[in-house]
Image (tube, grey):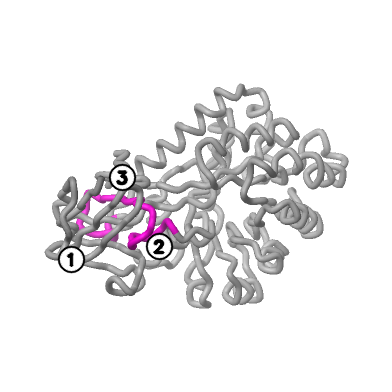
Amino acid sequence: MSLLITDIGSLVTNDPALGSGPLGLLTDAAVVVEGSTVSWVGPAAAAPAADTVFDAAGRALLPGFVDSHAHLVFAGDRTAEFNARMSGQAYTAGGIRTTVAATRAASDAQLEAGLTRFIREALRQGTTTIECKSGYGLTVEDEARALRIAAAHTPETTYLGAHVVAPEYAEDPAGYVDLVTGEMLDVCAPHARWVDVFCEKGAFDGDQARAILTAGAARGLTPRVHANQLSYGPGVQLAVELGAASADHCTHLTDEDVSALASSSTVATLLPGAEFSTRAPYPDARRLLDAGATVALSTDCNPGSSFTSSMAFCIAVAVREMGMTPDEALLAATLGGAQALRRTDVGRITPGARADLLLLDAPSHVHLAYRPGVPLTAAVWRAGVQEL
């Protein structure tokens, strides 16, 4: 079955060869979908016939958002922690352990129900590709079940046994690193595509992070790194050195860090929801973009420091607080996220790409930043199927 989406007022293809500027913008456009993929893009007046027709009524059509950093398999609630922090208490990495206790106590059914709720919530807001990490179990069994549950709903699963040191190993962090690089990795690797580590004071230092990432790479997992969120540190340099797909957070960067990212294939994934929710300084996206680094935006959806599943919200914050233009922020939330996941089939609307599409109830993608907090999703297609 084929679908023609026509009378598109503004079409973002993310292919400069198809339209104007980096977004490859087309006006008065149409898209044809064959099965799960895009088969044709061009002027509405030249569109081929299709089995069914959808009238976009002059609205904007974008690639579905690609959220390349999320923590969705967890249980419990940290409202009290957020309330305390907003009343003056500083955020530290140790808050993760609160969720660990609740997650360990939850059943598989409870964890899966939470995961599917958040994926559906994100889909309603235009996210059609989402990554999901483990990291709230910190035992061999709990990390493995988190990844098994996640893998049933997304191919983008990340082994994050190295989120923080498990409470049982508080006095023996070296022993925990041995577990993460040994038995836990053995059980988790079959259910994961990526390996990640929180390289930060209060979590894992540079040497520990290197051991964890290289062990994961030896098992066929591609590295990604929680890097330089709370302070300056070795995370970004380590990510670049090891060829990580992304260095995530990138809040505290030296000139050398920026240069390393700009001269590498490692994507700088920025997570403005974390800074918004912790009243921390925002990463300087303008500095990274001007240096030539590839930038992605993601939600970092998690119960402790960024409890949002809204990529549109992150776009608005990035434009207002991080020096990005609306075009740059949208590109980072779509094509940038795809690059952070090393995907070429999503984050764009081009012939051969997966038909992941977001129709806005607005004439332009700029409304994502221009009208923050307003529900603008009119329709969503994922792999050619209309989900909303």
* Residue closer to the observer: 116 or 1: 1
Residues under labels 1 and 3: Cα distance? 21 Å
Residue 98 seen in the current view:
no
Quickly name the residue at label 2: 329
Magenta stretch containing residue 219, yes or no? no
Instruction: Please identify the dominant SS of the magenta region.
Output: loop
Q: Residues within 10 Å of mark 1 (few under 14, many from 20)?
A: some
Task: Give above or below for 68 relative to 302.
Answer: below
Task: Give above or below for 130 relative to 46.
Answer: above
Of pointers 1 and 2, the one earlier in the residue sequence: 1
The spot of residue 111 in percent (x, y) is: 56, 28
The spot of residue 122 in percent (x, y) is: 41, 41
Quickly name the residue at label 1: 43
Q: Quadrant of residue 171?
A: top right
The quadrant of the image that shows the C terminus is top left
Residue at (29%, 71%) from the top-left corner?
A: 18
Q: Give, as a single range, the part of the protein colored magenta.
A: 345-367
Residues under labels 3 and 2: Cα distance? 20 Å
* Element marked by disc 3: strand
* Element marked by disc 2: helix
